[in-house]
């Protein structure tokens, strides 16, 4: 396979703190010999584990980038043993535009792994993570939130993996992050995800969904910052007491957890995030906005549990995700 077109201005083997860029040539109308420049910080102190932090895998999810820019501005080499790699804006063109996907090529970073050094810009960035950054890491924390179209109870998540020893390490890392909710997340389609690429390499991988709506709050940013402090201690990179609050453990045993719309219209949520719901309970109605006098279409929970995620904007179309019911364990 071809070399990556991305070059780094930081040396991943050098001790100390370096702030630099991943540079990807991008020739366009405003700059014929221009570049996409993705900010990166590497902090290293001797031998030890490596953690790779990423935010803005989707460009409209903000807790991760905020907490990671903050971490990058404050990290000191003398406070760590091992290495911390921080990329607050993974899909940087999407992040700059405040969009889920790249405005240059439409690429959804979390659907293009393992990427391609000769592909689209998004695929080239994914390939760099897949072949250069992921192999350096022992622990990988990829921050997500709901973005403009989803909203969640704030949670840290791990996946069911074939390798049960690796799965146990991911669950331990999820518990160390200590979000208010800890979810064994069943993905709708895990193919081509960054998560899957990291897990297939045997990495200890965790992710988050910290609320959503295309914004952030003091509460959710606080969860992200505390999670970073805890995971650094858990990995043995920093010292200090774990900050532990109560977490509700949730499981998603199968696709009954998901509610999807089969109609287009105006959504009326009949339960709120955090509500207990019973199998068969009405969770949402979709109103036909083309005419008056028609009954809304009703949608029901497929399983007993806690309403953990939902569609955010007021309108839905056929096929849209309406909500998630996760099961307390
Ligand atoms: Zn996301």
Image: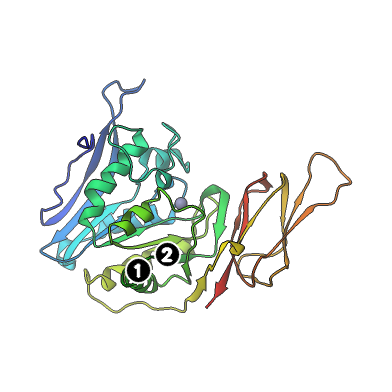
Left or right: 275 as drawn, with respect to 178: right
Q: Residue lying furthest front in this view?
A: 162
Q: Residue at x 35, y 38 (%)?
A: 123
Is 287 left or right of 56, judged from the image as shown?
Answer: right
Residue farthest to the right, as pictured: 293
Q: Nearer the viewer, residue 267 or 190?
A: 190
Q: Position of residue 301 (x, y in %)?
A: 68, 65
Residue at 41% in and 73% down: 178
Horizontal arrangement in the rendering, residue 6 relative to residue 252 (left or right)? left
Task: Describe the element under mark 1 as helix, strand or loop.
Answer: helix
* 262 lies above or below 151: above
The quadrant where residue 21 appears = top left
Depth check, front residue: 281 or 236: 281
| Image vertical order of residue 291 relative to residue 84, above or below | above
Residue 130, how many percent across, how many down? 28, 48
Residue 297 position in % (x across, y down) = 78, 53
Q: Which mark is residue 159?
A: 2
Q: Is residue 61 above or below residue 278?
A: above
Name the residue rendered at 37%, 64% in the picture: 225
CB-based contact (under 8 Å), mark 2 and mark 1: yes
| In-image side of 106 versus 25 (left or right) | right
Colour scheme: rainbow
- Which label is found at residue 249? none
Estimate the spatial distance between the alpha carbons at disc 2 and disc 1, rounded to whole Å: 8 Å
Number of residues whose C-alpha sits closer than 10 Å to that of mark 2, classed few (under 14), some (14–19) or many (20 or more): many
Where does label 1 land, which residue? 170
């Amino acid at each position: 396979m071809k070399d990556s077109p991305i070059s780094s201005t930081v040396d991943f083997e050098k001790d100390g703190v370096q702030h630099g860029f991943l540079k990807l040539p991008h020739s366009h109308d405003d700059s014929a010999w221009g570049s996409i420049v993705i900010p990166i910080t590497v902090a290293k102190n001797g031998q030890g584990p490596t953690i790779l932090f990423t935010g803005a895998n989707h460009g409209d999810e903000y807790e991760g980038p905020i907490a990671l820019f903050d971490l990058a501005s404050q990290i000191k080499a003398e406070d760590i043993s091992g290495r911390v790699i921080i990329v607050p804006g993974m899909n940087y063109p999407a992040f700059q535009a405040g969009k889920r996907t790249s405005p240059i090529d439409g690429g959804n970073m979390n659907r293009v792994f393992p990427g391609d050094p000769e592909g689209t810009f998004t695929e080239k960035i994914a390939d760099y993570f897949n072949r250069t950054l992921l192999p350096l890491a022992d622990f990988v924390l990829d921050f997500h939130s709901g973005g403009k179209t989803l909203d969640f109870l704030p949670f840290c998540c791990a996946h069911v993996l074939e390798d049960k020893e690796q799965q146990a390490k991911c669950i331990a890392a999820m518990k160390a992050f200590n979000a208010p909710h800890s979810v064994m997340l069943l993905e709708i389609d895990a193919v081509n995800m960054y998560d899957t690429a990291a897990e297939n390499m045997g990495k200890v991988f965790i992710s988050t969904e910290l609320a959503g709506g295309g914004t952030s709050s003091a509460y959710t940013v606080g969860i992200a910052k505390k999670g970073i402090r805890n995971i650094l201690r858990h990995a043995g990179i920093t010292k200090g007491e774990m900050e532990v609050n109560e977490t509700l453990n949730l499981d998603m045993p199968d696709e009954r957890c998901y509610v999807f719309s089969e109609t287009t219209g105006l959504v009326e949520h009949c339960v709120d995030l955090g509500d207990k719901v019973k199998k068969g309970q009405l969770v949402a109605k979709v109103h036909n906005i083309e005419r008056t006098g028609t009954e809304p279409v009703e949608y029901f929970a497929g399983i007993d549990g806690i309403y953990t995620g939902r569609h955010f904007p007021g309108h839905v179309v056929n096929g849209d995700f309406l909500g998630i019911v996760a099961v307390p364990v």
